[in-house]
Image: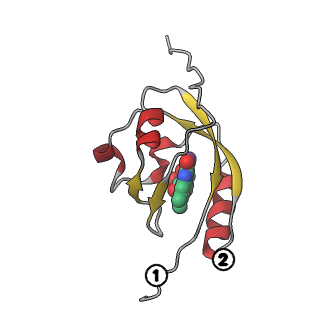
Amino acid sequence: MEKTSKEIYVDRKRVIVTRTDLKGIIEFANQDFMDISGYSLDELVNHPHNIVRHPDMPAVIFKLMWKRIQLSQDIFAVVKNRAKNGDYYWVTTKFEVRRDPLT
Ligand SMILES: Cc1cc2nc3c(=O)[nH]c(=O)nc-3n(C[C@H](O)[C@H](O)[C@H](O)COP(=O)(O)O)c2cc1C
């Protein structure tokens, strides 16, 4: 029988910070990201960000997200993520697209 997943309470004071490359491969994750998702830094860094993707999230949201990233536009979205243990948590995203001045 499948275990029912529970919502992980995320304190509003917690700020999940993550940085990826242009393909969505995680380059940096802060302690709050690790604590809430249950993944270690090793499990996150150099892995695709869809590691926390929840199957309830419609693919179209991410399509739109990537479109906006390509246009260097900010995105505010509420995303349901899946933790390592199968439970879920909600995050409000804010993206900042950085262009390296040397490239
Ligand atoms: C900076 C950044 C943060 C992201 N954060 C999340 C996230 O919290 N949850 C998530 O499911 N996808 C996140 N994504 C999108 C994933 O890279 C991925 O596109 C998404 O999980 C859908 O998976 P798929 O592209 O394999 O269909 C993020 C992407 C970027 C660039």
- Respond yes or no on whether mark 2 lies under 8 Å from ligand 1: no
Q: Is residue 82 left or right of residue 75?
A: left
Q: Residue at x 64, y 51 (%)?
A: 93
Tag 2 secondary structure:
loop
Q: Residue at x 65, y 61 (%)?
A: 65
Disc 1 versus disc 2: nearer the observer: 1
Q: Is residue 62 left or right of residue 25?
A: right
**The furthest residue to the top:** 1
Q: Residue at x 60, y 24 (%)?
A: 7
Q: Which residue is mark 2?
A: 71
Residue 88: where, in percent of width, then height?
56, 30
Tell which of 29 and 59 is nearer to you. 29
Tell which of 27 and 64 is nearer to you. 27
Residue 14: where, in percent of width, then height?
55, 39
- Respond yes or no on whether mark 1 lies under 8 Å from ligand 1: no
Asked where in the image residue 28 lies, by quadrant, the reply is bottom left
Tag 1 secondary structure:
loop
Image disc number at residue 75 = none
Residue 80: where, in percent of width, then height?
63, 38
Location of residue 65 with respect to 79 vertically, above or below? below
Location of residue 34 with respect to 60 vertically, above or below? above
Tell which of 68 and 8 is nearer to you. 8
For the residues marked 1 and 2, what is the alpha-carbon distance in whole angstroms? 15 Å
Q: Residue at x 69, y 61 (%)?
A: 75
Q: Which residue is mark 1?
A: 100
